[in-house]
Amino acid sequence: MKLKPIFILAMVVILAVVGTLLFMQKSNDSGAQSGKIGGDFTLSSAQGPVTLSDYDNQVKLLFFGYAHCPDVCPLTMANIKVALKQLTENERQQVQTLFVSVDPERDTLAHLEQYVNFFDPSFVGLTGSKAEIDRVVRQYGAFYRLDKASEEDENYTVSHSARLYVIGKDNEIEQYLYHDSSSEEIAEALKTLLQTQ
C-alpha cells in the first residue's frame, strides 16, 4: 500500500513530461516557434547564386531532398505541381518553389535544373558545397545521411527529412507540411497564407 501513492505520482510525472513533449512538437510543426529556425541563406542554382531574400515578394515552398530519390522527393514535387494548378494565375505568380539537394556529389547544377524543370519550369534547384548545405540544413532543423556501402558506392540512397516548409514573404516559416501532404492541402495552405500577406 505504501508504494501506491509513489507509483501514482510517478505516472503523473511521466504523463506530464510526455504531454509537454507532444505539445512542444505540435508547436514546432504549427510554426509557433518558427522564429528559432529558418531565415535567409545563399546557395547555388544553374543560373547563379540564389538567396531566400531574392523572393521577398513571394511565398516560398522549401524542400530538402535529392534528384535520385526514388519516392519521397518526386511525390512531393508532383504534389506541389498539382497544387499550383489549383491557384489562380495571380496566386501562382506569388509562389516560388525551392528544392535544395543534399547530394551535391551526383546532383550537379545542370542535372538539378533538369530535374526540377521536369515538374515545373518555375521550380528552382539549389545546392552547394557540403559545408554550405550542412549550414542550411542545420538552420532549418532538417537532416540527411548518405547511405553508402563504401566510399566508391555510386548507387547510394540518402535518408533525409521530409518537411515541406511554407515560408511567408517576410521569410518566416509559417507552416510545415510533409511529403505525403495532398495537393489540396498544399493549395489550401498557400491560398490561406496569400490572403494574409
Image (cartoon, rainbow, N blue to C red):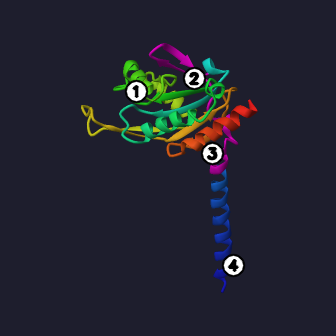
- In the rendered structure, the answer to whether residue 44 lies left or right of residue 32 reads left
Relative placement, left or right, of 17 versus 103 is: right
Q: What is the quadrant of residue 116 in the picture?
A: top left
Which tag, 1 or 3, sits closer to the chain's start?
3
Q: Is residue 166 above or below residue 13?
A: above
Q: CA distance from mark 2 to mark 3?
A: 21 Å
Seen at 70% across and 42% down, the residue is 32
Q: Which residue is mark 3?
A: 29
Q: Residue at x 64, y 81 (%)?
A: 3
Q: Mark 1 or mark 4: which comes first in sequence?
A: 4
Element type where label 3 sits in the image: helix
Q: Nearer the viewer, mark 3 or mark 4?
A: 3
Q: Which residue is mark 1?
A: 115
Label located before the other in sequence (4 or 2): 4
Cα distance between the residues tagged 1 and 3:
28 Å
Question: Is residue 42 magenta-colored?
Answer: yes
Residue 21 in percent (x, y) is at 63, 55
Instruction: Please give the residue where the numbered disc 4 appears in the rendered image.
Output: 5
Q: Secondary structure at mark 4?
A: helix
Q: Residue furthest bottom?
A: 1
Q: Residue furthest right?
A: 196
Q: Tell me where residue 149 sits by quadrant.
A: top left
Q: How many marks?
A: 4
Q: Looking at the picture, tell me which residue is in the foreground, 78 or 40.
A: 78
Q: Earlier in the sequence, mark 3 or mark 4?
A: 4
Under mark 2, the amino acid is Phe
Residue contact between numbered discs 4 and 2, judged by CB atoms under 8 Å: no
Q: Residue 169 placed where, x, y %?
A: 68, 26
Span of residues in magenta: 25-52
Q: Which amino acid lies under the numbered mark 3 shown in the image of this protein?
A: Asp
Taking 80 as reference, is 54 above or below it?
above
Q: Earlier in the sequence, mark 2 or mark 3?
A: 3
